[in-house]
Image (cartoon, rainbow, N blue to C red):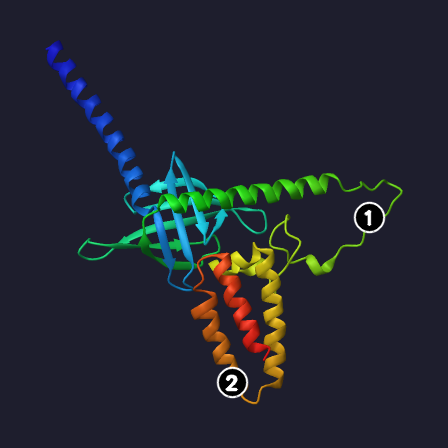
Amino acid sequence: MKKLFASVILVLLTGIFLCACSKKDAGKSLLDEVSGVWRAKTDGAMVSIIYADKKMRLFIGENPVSVTLGEIDDANKTINLNVTTNLGKPGVWTIRQIWDKEHKSFYLQMTLHDGIQDELTFVRKISSDDMNRFANSEAKQTGAIGAAAKSSSEQPQTTASEPPPNPDVSNQNQPSPQANWSPSFDCAKVSNGPERLICSNKELSEADVQLAQAYKAALKNSSNKGTLKQQQAAWLKNERNASSDAESMLRVYKERIAVLSK
C-alpha cells in the first residue's frame, strides 16, 4: 500500500513539473514566433521585435524603444511590454498574435498604452546585420544620453540669491529631456512610427520644420491648393511614412523640400 501511494505521489509531482515546463516552453515559443521584422499597416513603419538572452528589445525603424518584458498569456497569445510614456508615467504595450482560420499564418496586433492599435505583417526574420545595426543604434543613444547628462552636470548652479532663468517656451514640445530640437508637430501627441522617428532625430526634426515652411509658402502661392494638398498627403503616406530608417527618410524630405521650393 505504501509503495502504491508513493508511486501515485511521484506521478502527480512529475505531471506538475511537466505542466510547468510546458507553460514555460509555450511562453518562450510565443516570444520566438513574434521575433522578427514587421511592417505596420497604418503608416508602413518597420517594427523589429527581438527576444534573446531573456531580454525583449523593440525598434521603430533604427531607433530603440526602452521596454521590459511583462506578462505573457499563451492562452490568448498576448505579450505585455512595460514602457515609460512621454509624460514619464508607466504604461503597457500589448502584442497579440492572431492566426488565420487555417492556422497557417499570423499577424500581430499591437496596442499602445493610449489604446491606439495597428496591425503588423511579417517581413523577415532578424539577421546578424540587423543585430549589428541595432547594437550601433543603442550605443549611439547611450552616448547621446551620457553626453546630455554630462552637459547638464556642467551647467552653473543658481544660488538662492539668483532668480531662476526664464523658461524657454519654444522648447516645451521637446520629444525627450535629452533633445534640444522640435519638429513642426507636437511630439507629445505622436501616434505612429515615422513621427516617433522624427522626434528622436535632430536632422529629421530640422528637415520637418523646413518642409513645413516650404509647404506653407507653396500653398500660399499655388493656384490649385486642392491638388497640392492631395500631393502632400500622398507624399506623407507613400514616401515619408514608407521610409524604414532615418537616412532614407532624410533623403525623401530633402527631395520634397526641393520640389516645393521650385
Whether residue 106 is visible to the viewer of this picture, yes or no, is: yes
Q: Is residue 130 above or below residue 262?
A: above
**Depth order, front residue of 151/25:** 151
Q: Tell me where residue 48 appears, x and y as whole percent.
A: 40, 50
Q: Residue 175 appears in which quarter of the rendering?
A: bottom right
Q: Residue 214 appears in which quarter of the rendering?
A: bottom right
Which amino acid, mark 2?
Gly
Q: Which mark is residue 164?
A: 1
Left or right side of 126 for 255? right
Q: Which mark is residue 173?
A: none
Instruction: Give neighbour class at mark 2: few <14, some 14-19, many 20+ (Cα, 10 Å).
Output: few
Q: Tell me where residue 154 appears, x and y as whole percent.
A: 75, 39
Q: Which residue is mark 2?
A: 226
Regarding mark 1 in the picture, which secondary structure is present there? loop
**Depth order, front residue of 23/209:** 209
Left or right side of 166 for 47? left
**Depth order, front residue of 248/141:** 248
Which amino acid, mark 1?
Pro
Left or right side of 201 for 70? left
Q: Nearer the viewer, mark 1 or mark 2?
A: 2
* Quarter of the picture holding the C terminus: bottom right
Q: Tell me where residue 203 appears, x and y as whole percent.
A: 59, 59
Regarding mark 2 in the picture, which secondary structure is present there? helix
Farthest-out residue, top: 2
